[in-house]
Image (cartoon, rainbow, N blue to C red):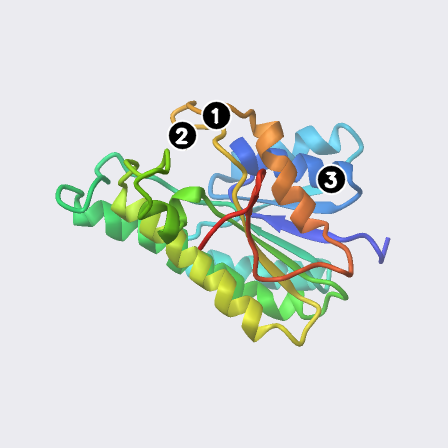
């Protein structure tokens, strides 16, 4: 149907991304599962279509801008617009760590993927989002990206010094702040959303939330109505300090 919302979720073949895709599809959204591995993407989409949900998969490698361009072209050809962009794909690196010991190669790789490549995806999808009556961009954030919390000795996250990862997510928050301001006179809403500490491959299966639980807040912000507020940094307990 023409009124069905169209969503692209990057890194949606596993973990939180896969759950976000499932919950959006269950809400009646046509979900495009973006995955670097096309076979895993097709398997994730097939699981949803087997339940009569609207889903398809597409190959997207955030480190290959040709695939990003191809995704935008295919969405334009197949759907004519994009209503929801969930920038979920991201990485960690075992060689990351405190500023005194982190491998600069690891920090560079993390920053490139989590920030620069996410910026590239967002720029490529913006012309399609501008064609939506109410575009929504959800950047998957983390409390570790908060400068205030990184500098607070009383915070339980104070000792989590991963200079590459934390800095990449702080940069992603800057994208949220600046993009929300730049798009303030449009129907596009941009927010940074922390899902919480979720058991996924990214966290080494550590955490106290399931992917299903972790997907709920990003999905809520992807489906915000006309009174949506843009430029927020939120987690399950409320607003997070920048």
Say which mark, if any, is on residue 25: 3
Identify the residue position indicated by label 1 in the image.
199
**Earlier-in-chain disc, 2 versus 3:** 3
> Residue 17, how many percent across, how many down?
56, 38
How many angstroms separate mark 1 from mark 3 (CA)?
22 Å
Instruction: Name the element at disc 1.
Output: loop
Instruction: Name the element at disc 2.
Output: loop
Which residue, as the protein is rendered here, is positioned at the far front? 154
Instruction: Name the element at disc 3.
Output: helix
> Residue 138, how many percent across, how many down?
58, 52
Say which mark, if any, is on residue 169: none
Using the rendered view, name the quadrant where residue 57 is placed. top right
10 Å neighbourhood of mark 1: few (<14), some, or many (≥20)? some
Q: Horizontally, is 107 left or right of 9 in the view?
A: left
Q: Residue at x 76, y 46 (%)?
A: 29
From this view, report whether residue 57 is shown above or below residue 125: above
**Earlier-in-chain disc, 1 versus 3:** 3
From this view, report whether residue 91 is shown above or below residue 208: below
Identify the residue position indicated by label 2 in the image.
203
Q: Residue at x 47, y 52 (%)?
A: 241
Q: Horizontally, is 96 left or right of 180 in the view?
A: left
Relative to the observer, which residue lies in front, 212 or 32? 212
Q: Nearer the viewer, mark 2 or mark 3?
A: 2
Q: Horizontally, is 51 left or right of 37 in the view?
A: right
Relative to the observer, which residue lies in front, 211 or 5? 211
Residue 68 in view (yes/no): yes
Q: Residue at x 69, y 44 (%)?
A: 220
Asked whether the residues under the numbered discs 1 and 2 touch, taking CB atoms below 8 Å apart as contact, a structural biologist would say yes
């Amino acid at each position: 149907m023409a009124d069905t919302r169209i969503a692209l979720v990057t890194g949606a073949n596993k973990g939180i991304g896969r759950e976000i895709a499932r919950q959006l599809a269950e809400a009646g959204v046509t979900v495009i599962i973006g995955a670097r591995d096309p076979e895993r993407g097709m398997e994730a989409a097939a699981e949803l279509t087997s339940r009569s949900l609207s889903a398809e998969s597409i190959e997207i490698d955030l480190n290959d801008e040709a695939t990003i361009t191809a995704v935008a072209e295919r969405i334009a050809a197949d759907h004519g617009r994009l209503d929801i962009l969930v920038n979920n794909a991201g990485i960690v690196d075992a060689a990351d760590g405190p500023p005194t010991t982190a491998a600069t190669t690891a920090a560079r790789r993390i920053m490139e993927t989590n920030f620069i490549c996410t910026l590239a995806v967002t720029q490529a999808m913006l012309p399609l989002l501008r064609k939506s009556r109410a575009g929504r961009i959800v950047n998957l954030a983390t409390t570790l990206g908060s400068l205030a919390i990184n500098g607070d000795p009383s915070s339980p996250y104070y000792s989590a010094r991963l200079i590459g990862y934390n800095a990449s997510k702080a940069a992603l928050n800057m994208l949220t702040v600046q993009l929300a301001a730049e798009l303030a006179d449009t129907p596009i809403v941009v927010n940074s959303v922390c899902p919480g500490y979720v058991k996924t491959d990214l966290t080494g299966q550590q955490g106290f939330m399931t992917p299903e639980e972790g997907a709920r807040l990003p999905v809520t912000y992807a489906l915000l109505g006309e009174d949506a507020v843009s430029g927020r940094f939120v987690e399950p307990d409320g607003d997070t300090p920048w």
